[in-house]
Amino acid sequence: MNNNLIKLGALVAFLLAPMTAHADLFSMYVSGKGSYAAGSSNAFNHLDSTVGAGAEAGLELAHVDIWGEALNMGGEQYYFTANLGFDVSFGNKWRFNMGFYTGPIVFMRPEQESDPFALSGTVRSALSSVGIDPTMVENEYNSAQGQETELNRYALGWNLGRLRLEVERELVPMVFIGMGGQVSYHMMLTGAAVAADAKNTVVEDIDRRYQLSTMDPNLSSDLRREMGAKELETDKMGGMNVNVGAYLKVEI
């Protein structure tokens, strides 16, 4: 009976050996990849395309993973992430990788051309009627437009939790082909939202100084709308994003 149990245990160990989880004390890799990237927050509206190509590189040290990716999403639009966490792998020739990470996420797009800002005739007249020079408001806006244009190029955030699953096949020693994806919960902030909040602060300051709401209840709202002023909505910064693709990896 004991011999049968020993034999059964040996057989189970033999069958499970290829699927034994393992993590290297030290390894590093670089890969070329193509990915689909999309998300639920406004930051992902910065991307004209959801498909991009780029590279990923990382290292594992004492079972801790550090890796980053850079994707060109077309039209001089870029998607970057940096990631810190851990993973576990199963198998040898065929490998299944699972990891959990956190880290920053950045979008960058080219500078957008913009025309000089000008108030509508109705708002100009309304401002003049309460003693505010509308040209002064326009000049202040246009003098800061360069800063706003730069802010509009970026969206910044943090993947609070990022789960990654991959399946890959070893082609030759140290070279793998695979496919996989990540799903993340993030907090994202666009430069456009920061600029809109700054303009909202300006309108609030003008409102306090000149009592716009008291003299004309609609003027403050009209000025906000024309300037693109909007209070930052922190409750809308959270969202989900996914990244799915294929890659060719060299690992040492």
Image (cartoon, rainbow, N blue to C red):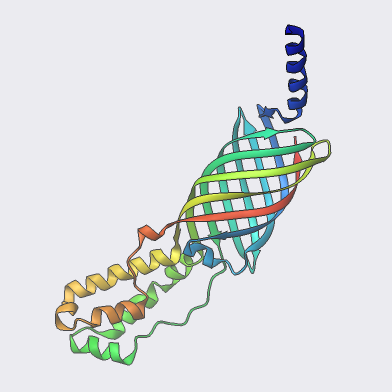
Q: Is residue 139 visible?
A: no
| Of the pair 175 and 161, the residue shown nearer to us | 161
Q: Is residue 115 left or right of residue 164?
A: left
Residue 238 image-quadrant placement: bottom left
Name which residue lies at 76% across and 29% down. 18
| Of the pair 3 and 82, the residue shown nearer to us | 3
Question: Of all residues shown, which one is farthest toward the top?
Answer: 2
Q: Is residue 113 left or right of residue 53?
A: left
Q: Is residue 11 left or right of residue 99?
A: right
Name which residue lies at 62% across and 67% down. 49
Tally of numbered discs: 0
Q: Is residue 215 left or right of residue 136?
A: left
Question: Of all residues shown, which one is farthest toward the front?
Answer: 1
Residue 166 at what x, y percent from top left?
A: 68, 44
Residue 233 at what x, y percent from top left?
A: 35, 62
| Of the pair 118 and 107, the residue shown nearer to us | 107
Name which residue lies at 22% across and 83% down. 132
Quarter of the image that includes the C terminus: top right
Quarter of the image that includes the N terminus: top right
Residue 113 at what x, y percent from top left?
A: 52, 77
In the rendered image, the vertical position of residue 74 relative to residue 24, given as above or below: below
Name which residue lies at 31% across and 70% down. 200
Q: Is residue 186 visible?
A: yes
Residue 184 at what x, y percent from top left?
A: 53, 50
